[in-house]
Image (cartoon, helix red, strand yellow):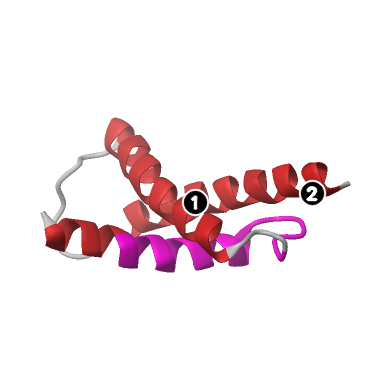
Amino acid sequence: MVAALLWALVGGIVLGFLGKLFAPGDTDRVPLWLTILCGIGGGLIGNFLYSLFFEPQTRGIDWWRHGWQVATAAVLVGLAAGASTRERV
């Protein structure tokens, strides 16, 4: 249980920063904690969406699954950036 939470946190950090890198718009206003939450959400939602369309269990590193996770995290970071921009204006 603790290991799964630790992996979710580490994966959320990595996916959040990759999502922030690929997200359109001004993502500099998204705070670190929200970036990490978007990364965790991107990992969970991206994994779910990938398993809807493709075989959920594959051998080796599933780069397509990680691509879906990064893309989902980028969408979530973009939405968070848009929400924070509207809030401050």
**Residue picked out by circle 1:** 38
Amino acid type, label 1: Cys
Point out which mark residue 85 bears.
2
Give me the residue at 37% from left, 51% from top. Answer: 43
Q: In the shown orientation, is residue 86 left or right of residue 41?
A: right
Assign the N terminus to one quadrant of the image.
Answer: bottom left
Q: Position of residue 29 (x, y in %)?
A: 72, 61
Q: CA distance from mark 2 to mark 1?
A: 16 Å
Q: Residue at x 71, y 55 (%)?
A: 24
Q: Secondary structure at mark 1?
A: helix
Q: Residues within 10 Å of mark 2 (few under 14, many from 20)?
A: some
Quarter of the rendering containing residue 21: bottom right
Circle 2 SS class: helix
Q: Position of residue 4 (x, y in %)?
A: 17, 57
- Give the quadrant of residue 63: bottom left
Percent position of residue 81, x then y: 69, 51
- Residue at 52% x, 67% y is 17
Kindly identify the residue that appears in the image at 33 percent across and 52 percent down: 65
Above-or-below relation of 49 to 15: above
- In primary-sequence order, the first of circles 2 and 1 is 1
Residue furthest toward the right? 89
SS majority, magenta: helix
First to last magenta residue range: 9-28
> Is 21 in the magenta?
yes
